DNA sequence: CCCTGATGAGAAAACGCTCCCTGAGGCCCG
DNA sequence: CGGGCCTCAGGGAGCGTTTTCTCATCAGGG
């Protein structure tokens, strides 16, 4: 099935290719009468401009790449929030009339593919979603001279990013616990090589220090198992603790289980707060109080940042505020 | 930053554009000596072929669209399994050297955009992910003469699909309950305008009928709340039931909560089986036995089907078998 | 030694579009 | 009434590839 070209439409309408092109692209310097006859021909033939030909001459593709940097086991893309991010990005791009190419950068090989693709001029900009702020890919892509933004904080020069206010979220959680009258508030951290984990720990520490309380810290790695284990350790080290702030919900869920096994009632004996507000947080019993990361909003902000950057606009990083969702566990 | 073109590379290597093109495309009819000098020039200049120009003449884009048909509230794309589908598709396409354009078809407007885009020749094929088998989009796209496959069963003519063996999964669940010695097995269905929901119900019915037992059916709509409500109704209607098969995990989770509130022990008094094996299924207490839909495998199969179709190969539908994941709730 | 056939390089024509440039015509103003 | 402008349509030159076709070169056989 051969699609009609501009030339065919022009012939049918009895005008030149230039005029058809002008009508298609909504230029105003075209007489209404010509416009009508062209539009009629377009509809009759079911004409749709060929994308490749257009890209070739305009050097714009109206296509943006979202590159997900992720180890093969899929830490990022397994995240339940991932799909809401993808959807938010997709919607936002659609509203702006852009297309979304999704690429996974799992192996070195696929990273090369990403770079090649980007270098091939098939996208107008790139949005990186990387777990590690130290990932070299953002910088590598930025060096290509293409607009690049990062969905998370990144250490790459010249790559604007959108970041969560992790420390602020932790403060929100700890303050809430203090308001509830908790005195011995422990925390379970994420892997400290991750920015987010460090920032959440810092927020926790600072808030306690500001109110003259001491920190009680156990290390986790963002998995449920590590949360359960860290909770066991905390109970051993400090049996009198009356609250726990876990750096993410999975660990909080692990902690809930340990507390249950240890016979501690939640929230009566020990209050628990998580972070991220994943879907499962509302299914636990008791339902988990959690700091909601506005991932969808963050995604929207990242898209806007990228679009602005493509237009040649400002490139300041954006910080997203968090929100506390109070449920039964506190 | 201007990227070098084929012409520049040719000049540098002291050969013709044709030769460079041949080397780039791995043709064998080129002397090793020329090959080497071209490759050197390519590397020195960091040459990457321009995608648009290439597409224009070859009429291939090596790009496939994944179109997610979804109401704005996001039933499909909110599904926790969605991200694993996306990842599997992405990986598979990457392995095949193809790119993935993700499009949401939420509104009529966006569906038009999808059709326009596809008609613009910017993709080699389309994979539809639609909830409703009656969705008109598959047929509309297929009419464009482009290879189209559906991730789910579809009623569209000429659109091959990959389907889950929903009835078989239900049989798996019910047989398991029977083996555990359960006698009065109820079910909570999904919305019956969905193929999947109907098939799961059919599988349940048939399996019970085959063993001379009667069906006990309550209607749900795949939400947690509806599962809880349906469970309440079932307990009222038939207080002696000793097992429930829920058509998806969310409803099973809702049912668990109702059972807990009603003072029924799971699995001692009532066994519960879900369907889909979402992540949350292993976090409930007791952890939920569930029929695992091999979504990732299904996605992989769909990609292969599409790639075969593009190559002009066979187009038979594929049916994926399910697997039962036994946990504490049975 | 010449002719034939194979081999492989180069020239040039598309692919379908945008956009610059030219020029025709109409209008206003002098 | 004529000249200059302004408006708007058409002609045509690219955009960077692939691909067909032509042609040169060289080897081998008669």
Image: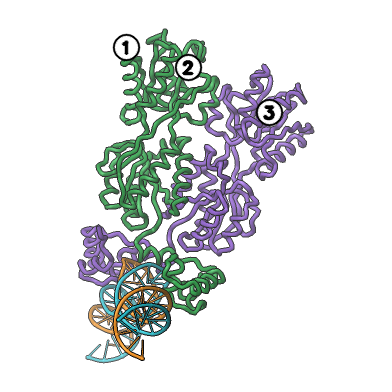
Chain colours: A purple, B green, C orange, D cyan
Q: Eyeballing the image, is A290 above or below B205?
A: below
Q: Nearer the viewer, residue B134 or A151?
A: B134
Q: Which element carries disc 2, helix, strand or loop?
A: helix
Q: Which element carries disc 1, helix, strand or loop?
A: loop
Residue drawn at (53%, 19%) of the image: B328
Specify the subunit that label 3 lies on: A
Query: Are the numbered discs 1 and 3 placed on the same chain, yes or no?
Result: no
Q: Which residue is mark 2?
A: B258
Percent across and percent down for residue B275 are 43, 26
**Dot 3 alpha-carbon crowd within 10 angstroms: few under 14, some 14 to 19, many 20 or more:** some
Res B266 seen here: yes
Percent across and percent down for residue A198 are 70, 42
The image's mark for residue A229 is 3
Image quadrant assignment for residue A230? top right
Residue sitting farthest toward the top: B240
Label 3 to label 2: alpha-carbon separation: 30 Å
Earlier sequence position, callout 1 versus callout 2: 1
Q: Which residue is mark 1?
A: B212
Q: Looking at the image, do the residues carrying marks 1 and 2 touch, with CB atoms under 8 Å apart?
A: no
Percent across and percent down for residue B22 are 43, 69
Q: Eyeballing the image, is B129 above or below D9?
A: above
**Dot 1 alpha-carbon crowd within 10 angstroms: few under 14, some 14 to 19, many 20 or more:** few
């Amino acid at each position: 099935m051969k699609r009609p070209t501009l030339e065919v439409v022009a012939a049918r309408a009895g005008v030149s290719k230039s005029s058809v092109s002008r009508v298609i692209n909504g230029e105003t310097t075209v007489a209404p009468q010509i416009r009508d006859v062209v539009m009629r021909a377009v509809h009759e033939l079911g004409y749709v401009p060929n994308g490749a030909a257009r890209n070739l001459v305009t050097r714009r593709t109206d296509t943006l790449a979202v590159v997900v940097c992720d180890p093969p086991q899929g830490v990022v893309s397994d995240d339940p929030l991932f799909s809401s991010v993808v959807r938010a990005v997709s919607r936002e791009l659609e509203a702006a009339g852009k297309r979304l190419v999704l690429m996974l950068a799992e192996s070195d090989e696929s990273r090369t593919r990403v770079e090649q693709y980007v270098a091939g001029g098939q996208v107008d900009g790139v949005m990186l979603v990387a777990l590690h702020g130290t990932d070299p890919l953002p910088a590598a892509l930025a060096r290509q001279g293409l607009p690049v933004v990062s969905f998370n904080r990144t250490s790459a020069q010249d790559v604007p990013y959108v970041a969560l206010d992790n420390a602020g979220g932790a403060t929100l959680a700890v303050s809430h616990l203090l308001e509830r009258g908790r005195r011995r508030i422990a925390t379970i951290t994420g892997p400290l090589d991750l920015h987010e984990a460090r920032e959440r720990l810092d927020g926790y520490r600072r808030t306690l220090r500001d109110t003259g309380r001491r920190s009680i810290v156990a290390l986790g790695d963002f998995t449920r198992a590590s949360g359960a284990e860290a909770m066991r350790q905390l109970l051993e080290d400090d049996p009198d603790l009356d609250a726990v702030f876990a750096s993410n919900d999975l660990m909080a869920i692990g902690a809930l289980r340990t507390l249950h096994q240890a016979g501690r009632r939640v929230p009566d004996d020990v209050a628990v707060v998580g972070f991220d507000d994943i879907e499962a947080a509302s299914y636990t019993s008791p339902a988990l109080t959690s700091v909601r990361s506005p991932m969808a909003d963050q995604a929207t902000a990242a898209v806007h940042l990228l679009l602005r950057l493509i237009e040649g606009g400002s490139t300041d990083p954006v910080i997203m505020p968090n929100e506390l969702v109070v449920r039964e566990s506190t």
